[in-house]
Image (cartoon, helix red, strand yellow):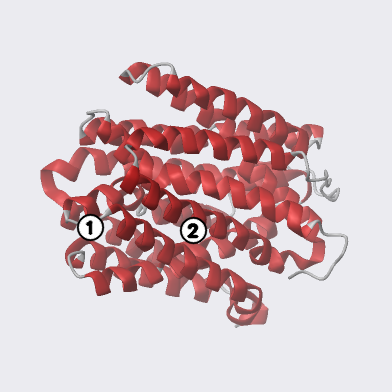
């Protein structure tokens, strides 16, 4: 818990809870829903890729608007409502082009919210930014609750329930956004163009690492649920496995405010990328062993929990003052946008042809290259030498 009474801990936490609850439906279960409509792997990969693809542009557009107006919470509220209304279009028709249009529209608004909310949270925390993970962990809890609930619901109901649950989570996101107060960023004396920040070797290396790390998650986000179902695992067990990963993430979030100052970003990134490489190889070649799958899911503590905490910390360090909103947006666009989109598209193209072993080996290669970039270009701070 954060002791500073000026920080609206529970209101910030509730937004994260519902936002990541929506991800807890979309990430594991949107692909099986599309499969239930009769779409093949290539089409599923293409439709799912729309969600991260809009992050290539949407967060930066909204981030620039937030930096200019300094009204981030107003933008979050408006885009949350528009995302809710846009997603409702999937109930009108399930034809390919209509679904593609609905997903493109809603994700353009939906992808605007989180980067700006990250900036709002860090502004509320002020000098306690290293305690960000203590708030963010509630998002992980939201993911756990919904992913286990969905596993149970799908044992009783058809996949047609999935879009309804997504719509409900979007409604709660919109409601919770109205409880969070605005918090302006601190004016900064350096008004240099943002490109002056981006072109620094350490920043470009960091963005390349973010791209590769999230590209490696493409097979996991798109086909993990389908993969396990094909291996004979039931909906409840699949839900439990997703939840195990996020529970490990919660545990590491509770420790990150100590680990980050103690070990520094560089060391944590290197360990995380190597353990993520191991995780993808275990999933790709030993998924028929339940105990191995559980261990691989525990490594989610590093491949998401540690990585995201370090990423947010470095963005907050590299992009200051009037660059803050666009810095968060650029991090989101590069990683959860371009990275996931490319990984998802590659997955859709090769899943049926070469299968899980090849695809998760590709994921492992991405994280190994990222580790080499960290080793060469991201140097430790003096305090952590």
Image position of 77 (left or right of 142) = right
Residue 205 makes an appearance in the image? no
Residue 239 sits in which quadrant?
Answer: bottom left
Residue occupying the point 51% across, 24% down:
88
* Residue 205: percent from left, percent from top: 49, 57
Answer few, some or many: residues within 10 Å of disc 1's Cα (few below 14, many 20 plus, some between 14 and 19): some
Secondary element type, mark 2 = helix
**3D distance between C-alphas at marks 2 and 1:** 18 Å
Image quadrant assignment for residue 202: bottom right
Instruction: Name the residue nearer the viewer: 192 or 115.
Output: 115
Tell me where residue 278 appears, x and y as whole percent. Answer: 30, 70
Residue at image mark 2: 144
- In the picture, measured across the screen, residue 24 lies left or right of residue 200, that is left
The image quadrant where one finds the C terminus is bottom right
Q: Where does the image place residue 153, in percent across and percent down from the top left? A: 39, 46
User: Residue at the location (33% across, 57% down)?
Assistant: 236
Q: Is residue 233 left or right of residue 332?
A: left
Secondary structure of the residue carrying tag 1 is loop
Relative image position of residue 63 (x, y in whole percent):
67, 37
The residue carrying mark 1 is: 233
Can you name the residue that lies furthest to the left here?
Answer: 353
Q: Residue at x 45, y 27 (%)?
A: 103
Residue 47 location, quadrant:
top left
Q: Is residue 233 above or below residue 93?
A: below
Q: Which mark is residue 167?
A: none
């Amino acid at each position: 818990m954060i002791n500073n009474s000026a920080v609206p801990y529970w209101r910030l936490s509730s937004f994260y809870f519902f936002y990541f609850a929506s991800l807890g439906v979309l990430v594991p279960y949107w692909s099986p829903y599309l499969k239930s409509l009769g779409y093949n792997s290539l089409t599923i990969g293409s439709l799912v890729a729309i969600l991260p693809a809009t992050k290539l542009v949407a967060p930066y557009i909204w981030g620039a608007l937030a930096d200019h107006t300094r009204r981030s919470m107003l933008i979050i509220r408006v885009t949350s409502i528009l995302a809710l209304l846009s997603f409702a279009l999937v109930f009108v028709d399930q034809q390919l082009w209509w679904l593609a249009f609905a997903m493109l529209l809603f994700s353009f608004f939906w992808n605007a919210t989180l980067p700006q909310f990250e900036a709002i949270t860090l502004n509320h925390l002020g000098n306690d930014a290293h305690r960000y993970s203590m708030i963010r962990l509630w998002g992980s809890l939201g993911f756990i609750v919904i992913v286990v609930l969905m596993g149970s619901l799908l044992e009783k109901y058809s996949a047609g329930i999935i879009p309804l649950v997504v719509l409900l989570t979007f409604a709660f996101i919109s409601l919770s956004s109205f409880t969070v107060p605005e918090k302006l960023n601190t004016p900064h004396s350096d008004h240099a163009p943002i490109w002056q920040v981006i072109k620094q070797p350490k920043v470009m290396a960091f963005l390349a690492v973010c791209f590769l790390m999230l590209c490696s998650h493409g097979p996991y986000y798109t086909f993990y649920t389908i993969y396990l179902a094909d291996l004979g695992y039931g909906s409840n067990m699949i839900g439990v496995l997703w939840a195990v990963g996020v529970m490990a993430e919660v545990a590491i979030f509770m420790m990150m405010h100590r680990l980050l100052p103690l070990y520094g970003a560089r060391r944590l990134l290197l360990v995380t990328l190597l353990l993520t490489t191991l995780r993808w190889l275990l999933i790709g070649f030993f998924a028929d062993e339940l105990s191995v799958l559980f261990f691989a899911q525990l490594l989610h503590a590093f491949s998401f929990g540690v990585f995201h905490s370090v990423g947010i910390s470095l963005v907050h360090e590299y992009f200051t003052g009037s660059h803050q909103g666009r810095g968060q947006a650029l991090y989101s666009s590069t990683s959860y946008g371009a990275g996931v989109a490319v990984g998802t598209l590659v997955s859709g193209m090769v899943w049926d042809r070469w299968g899980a072993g090849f695809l998760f080996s590709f994921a492992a290669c991405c994280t190994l290259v990222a580790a080499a970039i960290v080793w060469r270009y991201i140097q430790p701070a003096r305090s952590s030498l």
